[in-house]
Amino acid sequence: MLNSSPFIFDLALIMIVASLAMLLCKFLKQPLVLGYLLAGFFVGPHFPFIPTVTETASVEIWAEFGVIFLLFTLGFSFTLKKLWNVGPKVIIIGLIKNLTMFSLGPILGYFFKWQPIIGFFVGVMLSITSTIVVARCLEETEQTNESFASVIMGIMIFEDLLVLIIILLISSLATSQTLSGYALLFSLFKKIGFVLFVVITAFILPKLLSRGQHLLTKETTLILSIGFCMLIAMMSAKAGLSPALGAFVAGMLLSETTESKIIKNMLIPIRDLFIAIFFVSVGMLINPKVLWENIGLIIILSLFMIFIKGITTSLASLLTKEDSKNAVAIGVLSIPIGEFSFVIATLGISMKVIDYDFYSVTVALSAISILVTTYLVKLLPFINEKINHSRYE
């Protein structure tokens, strides 16, 4: 029964501690994300002074909903036409950024005397940018309509596909088997089918909602939109893509309808609740003991991730003829790592390439990258002013 389940206790604990941490960050004028991470640490297993969340599996499920709802609402600020226009640019930037990081991972590993495969895993983990952090930064700073926002979101979609290919290759290596031609063909057909469904829906959905507008109340509109989001997310997962990508597509499709602003406004409180749980779930994984034992490694990898990744992405953006302002913004927003980096780390553990301590290091790097990005995004106007000033001197 619900009243005998730790579900209510865990949710109440997370919300109370997250609220207090948020108020503290507001008072100190610090990013809210910092408050969520601190709250996660306080209710996690490595801080024994207050009650601890008992069902971490449930928290992980709620956190996944946070990713889905954030990408769903973000999709309302984009259209298929916008992303299509930045397609070639996205592929060039994405390839340069990721191939550079993949290549430098083993080189970095050489100095730590790692095996090349460990260096490759580290390069992949540090390369993949966190979609949920980028989306949150764009939302908080009200920059979703900036031209660079379409580019960075396009890069996220490109990376989503790239990570799935990497996971497929690594998984086949782990099992010493390759997919048969039939399996590859079937996988390709599923993805093509998903794309065709999206294109057809883009033409039909606005007309359907327009004709049935007299039947829609706020309640039915909200339920229908969430149902539609979950349907597309499920179809995306079945096609071998991520549910978050499907949610983003669902938002883009609904953005073409007359009800888009109403739907987005109603979704914001739901989104914010689950986003808080997502960042709390990351904070719960922070283990101070492991971090202290690996402090040197964390500092070096953090500098590598922030400077090499950010600069490479900015330079790649300049090569595609983005102006300096947009190139700097894209470079900054490429820094944070998150959800897919944890997936790669988990896969590395299952292959016995990396251990659980390195997973904790990955969590620490994620937290550092989130905070650095949050601060740098707020400093973008100042950074661009300095760049322009030095250019004209």
Image (tube, rainbow, N blue to C red):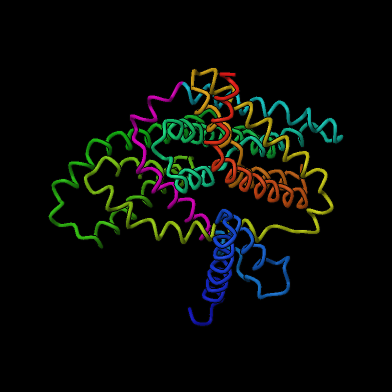
x, y (%) of residue 310?
Answer: 62, 32
Instruction: Determine which quarter of the picture holds residue 168.
Output: top right
Left or right placement of residue 111 versus residue 210 in this view: right
Q: In front: 86, or 116?
A: 86
Magenta-colored stretch includes residue 72 = yes
Magenta stretch in the rendered image: 61-88
Q: Residue at x 40, y 48 (%)?
A: 72
Residue 363 image offset from top left, x and y in percent: 68, 50
* Residue 210 versus residue 124 in the image, above or below: below
Question: Measured along the vertical axis of the image, is residue 200 above or below residue 319?
Answer: below
Taking the magenta stretch, the answer to whether it contains residue 116 is no
Residue name at image x 59 percent, y 45 percent: 375
Residue found at x 23% / y 49%: 259
Residue 311, above or below 269? above
Q: Main secondary structure of the magenta part?
A: helix
Task: Give the quarter of the image for residue 203.
Answer: top left
Residue extending farthest to the front is 393
On the picture, is 48 further left or further right than 249?
A: right
Measured along the vertical axis of the image, is residue 25 above or below residue 208?
below
- Say which quarter of the image contains residue 332: top right
